[in-house]
Amino acid sequence: MRELILSMSMSLDGFVSGPAGEVDWIFSDDQEAKAWKLQTVRNASLHIMGSRTFRDMAAFWPTSTMAFAAPMNQIPKAVFSKRGAAVLDGLAARTGSGQPLQAGAQSWAQPYIAGGGIVDEIHRLKASGGKPIIAHGGARFARSLIAHNLVDVYALLVHPIALGQGRAIFSDLPAPRPLKRVGSKAFPGGAMAQIYRPG
């Protein structure tokens, strides 16, 4: 059975974005932090996400030349959407920016569409052997995974910034959730990777 890793960037005060979804603060020049995040992304056999994140990423990664583009394009995807295959409507138009498509870009048009209940779908996806599943936010999707106790590993990159307000991922817990820290790494730019498992 493969594990589900929730990979998120977070502010010091626990937000994964500003109140309107602002995430510009997560893009730093800290090469060591980027390398850690890239290794986490590369170590996946499947990327999962909610429909909004899927559509945003599907419009960006197919033509990107960033280091993250190869694993984001080439590793299979699953999108969680109650709309079913309609989540793919207009996707070709959004990725047709005139720039050349990168290797694996077609995978964005061929995701597994998880239209059932989140618990059943995650158990079905975990049932295969192999490398981990990496879950990407948004905050609402991450909150749902956490609230249903579906996350096996929390890979949190905590940035040296306090936002004061924003979107949190631990706000829908039905009760306090003990976590056990199993790793941490500080980076030169001030960010810190914190790895937790359910306690």
Image (cartoon, grey):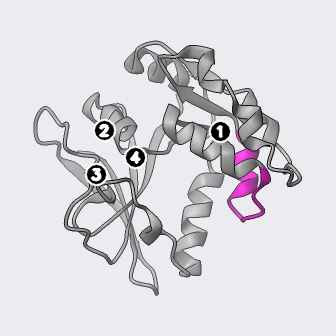
Q: Magenta includes 28?
A: no
Q: Mark 4: which amino acid?
A: Val
Indicate which disc, 2 or 3, sits on the residue closer to the N terminus.
2
Looking at the rendered structure, the secondary structure element under dot 2 is: helix
Q: Magenta includes 72?
A: yes
Whether tag 2 and tag 3 are in contact, CB under 8 A, the answer is no
- The residue singled out by tag 1 in the image is 45
| Looking at the image, residue 165 lies above or below residue 123 | below
Q: In the picture provided, is 93 more to the left or to the right than 43?
A: right
Q: Residue at x 86, y 48 (%)?
A: 103
- The residue singled out by tag 4 in the image is 153
> Could you give the CA–CA distance between mark 1 and mark 3, rounded to whole angstroms?
28 Å
> Could you give the CA–CA distance between mark 4 and mark 2, rounded to whole angstroms?
14 Å
Q: Within 10 angstroms of label 2, few (less than 14), some, or many (20 or more) residues?
A: some
Q: Which residues are magenta?
A: 63-75
Indicate which disc, 4 or 2, sits on the residue closer to the N terminus.
2
Indicate which disc, 1 or 3, sits on the residue closer to the N terminus.
1
* Residue 99 on image: x %, y %: 85, 55
> Could you give the CA–CA distance between mark 1 and mark 2, rounded to whole angstroms?
22 Å
Q: In the picture provided, is 189 more to the left or to the right than 56?
A: left
Indicate which disc, 1 or 2, sits on the residue closer to the N terminus.
1
Number of marks drawn: 4
